Image (cartoon, grey):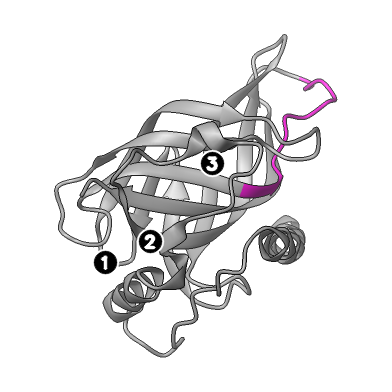
Amino acid sequence: MYKASLSRLTHSLMIAAAAASSACTNDAPLGVSRGAAPGARVAASAEATSGAADRGPDLTGCEHLRAPEGSKLVAHMYAAGAQIYRWSGTAWVFAGPSAVLYSDAAGSDQVGTHYAGPTWESSDGSTVRGSLPVACPVGSNAIPWLRLTGTPGERSGIFRRATTIQRVNTVGGTIPTEPGTAPGDEKHVPYAAEYYFYRAQ
């Protein structure tokens, strides 16, 4: 029951995030054939990204989140899932994300996952871990936009050379306002966002 409700809510959040994205940019979403093999879908996403989306997101108001000069956009993905918070006994502490990554705004083509670290893992097996976040608050109903430094894993693939990550067009995911009942309690707050991944030239 919980999973079904979460799925419906995150789908609604993805639609809202896609609408926000459309309002901020003219870039076309990454459309990839659902029937393609995982590696082919990721490669197709990268190929589509190298076109119009090479400009990256509209960062009006958050210009300090721009990727370093000379960076090359290698992937643009949509996420839907939850931000997990754990009650310490006195406050909610962020425990990590749990989300699915898609190549399209409709959430019909899964190309990876996002989990604690924070780590992004592509369906081609490559990973990148984020650190040193720089934030840009965007209101009380959405988690901040971020720029993170990326540390790629050892496996080859789309994330192998990713050195900068942007989280933008966020919806939901904010810290709970009601206290927990006991230490260790967890809240999974649905969220949606877009992630842009860059490599150094």
Q: Earlier in the sequence, mark 2 or mark 1?
A: 2
Left or right: 30 in relation to 54: right
Amino acid on which the number 2 mark rests in the picture? Ala
Disc 3 and disc 1: Cα gap in Å?
A: 20 Å
Amino acid on which the number 1 mark rests in the picture? Asp
Local SS, label 2: strand
Query: Residue 24: horizontal and vertical position, in percent?
Result: 68, 58
Question: Picture quarter containing residue 85?
Answer: top right
Q: Which residues are magenta?
A: 169-181
Nearest the viewer among 155 and 168 is 168
Q: Can you identify the residue that label 1 sits on?
A: 124
Checking the image for residue 201, the label placed there is none
Local SS, label 1: loop
Majority SS type along the magenta span: loop
Checking the image for residue 75, the label placed there is 2
- Density class for disc 1 (Cα within 10 Å; few <14, some 14-19, many ≥20) is many
Q: Can you identify the residue that label 3 sits on?
A: 97
Q: Is residue 22 above or below residue 72?
A: below
- Taking the spot 74% from the left edge, 65% from the top edge, the residue there is 19
Disc 3 and disc 2: Cα gap in Å?
A: 19 Å
Q: Is residue 117 visible?
A: no
Q: Earlier in the sequence, mark 3 or mark 2?
A: 2
Left or right: 17 in relation to 55: right
Q: Are marks 2 and 1 in contact (CB under 8 Å)?
A: no
Q: Earlier in the sequence, mark 3 or mark 1?
A: 3
Q: Are marks 3 and 2 in contact (CB under 8 Å)?
A: no
Query: Residue 7: horizontal and vertical position, in percent?
Result: 69, 63
Q: Is residue 97 visible?
A: yes
Disc 2 and disc 1: Cα gap in Å?
A: 13 Å
Q: Are marks 3 and 1 in contact (CB under 8 Å)?
A: no
